[in-house]
Amino acid sequence: MVLYFKFVKVLLVEDDCILGEFLKEYLTSEGLVVDWIEDSREFFDLLETSIYDVIILDLMMPHISGEALLKEFRKRGYKTPVLILTAKNRLEDKEECFSLGADDYLTKPFEPRELLLRIKALHRRVVRDERLNFKEVEVDLSAGRVWVKGNEIKLTKKEWLLLKYLVENRHRHVPTEELLNYVWGDEPVGDDVVRTHIKNLRRLLPEGFIISKKGWGYKVEA
């Protein structure tokens, strides 16, 4: 059964190509959006163009260790939850990672289902209000579901990610570039694709629910 926290964006940092391919396929089949990198040197370059809800990080990576990545990640001020996925099972290794800012620690071998449940738990920690009401619109952030006047509407993955990010940042105008980074990552698309998806969302949502600020971005009318 697919868990209803679909469309959560996950970055998987894993140099084992067999395990990485399996996890990406498994998590994608459960509805998540997964980016996978095998080279730890790509980590921070990717974060400049993409925004993630959860990061899964192996420790024994070539070039740059997982511990070094985690330390620098927190030093730069990133708050994204990090789940360590590693064969290192000593208590000292766990203590080090938690002291560096890890949020969870899972040792190999492991059950894929357990990894899925842990991702769900981490995501729920950062989603303060999971079910929000905006007069005629109700949004369940953890379930990836939207209702208008009591009737559920169906959204594509891109539409949901766009709406989800706007709802989570409902108290401010979100710049178009920020939406591009979150929804499309490093895909070669421009502002026009955001406008098209906003137009599609506005057809499904009440008039005035998504407002725009010319030359800046968008905001949901909370």
Image (cartoon, rainbow, N blue to C red):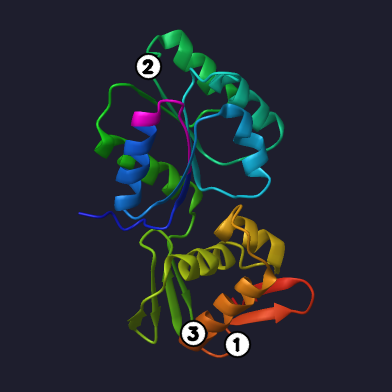
Circle 3 sits on which residue? 205
Q: Is residue 141 above or below residue 217?
A: above
Amino acid carrying mark 2 in the image: Ala
Give percent across and percent down for residue 40: 57, 28
Q: For residue 5, which quarter of the picture?
A: bottom left
- Which part of the image, by quadrant, shows the N terminus? bottom left
Circle 1 sits on which residue? 208
Can residue 221 be seen from the camera position used here?
A: no
Please tell me how crowded label 3 is: few (under 14), some (14-19), or many (20+) other residues with Cα within 10 Å.
some
How far apart, in angstroms, are the residues tagged by discs 3 and 2? 47 Å
What kind of element bears circle 1?
loop
How far apart, in angstroms, are the residues tagged by discs 2 and 1? 51 Å
Circle 2 sits on which residue? 87
Sequence-wise first label, 3 or 2: 2
Can residue 69 be seen from the camera position used here?
A: yes
Q: Which residues are magenta?
A: 11-18
Sequence-wise first label, 2 or 1: 2
Give percent across and percent down for residue 146: 40, 74
Give percent across and percent down for residue 183: 56, 60
Amino acid carrying mark 1 in the image: Gly
Amino acid carrying mark 3 in the image: Leu
Q: Residue sitting at 71 percent across and 71 percent down?
A: 217
Please tell me how crowded label 1 is: few (under 14), some (14-19), or many (20+) other residues with Cα within 10 Å.
few
What kind of element bears circle 2?
loop
Give percent across and percent down for residue 208: 60, 87
Magenta stretch contains residue 14:
yes
In the image, 166: left or right of 33?
right
Residue 93 numbered tag = none
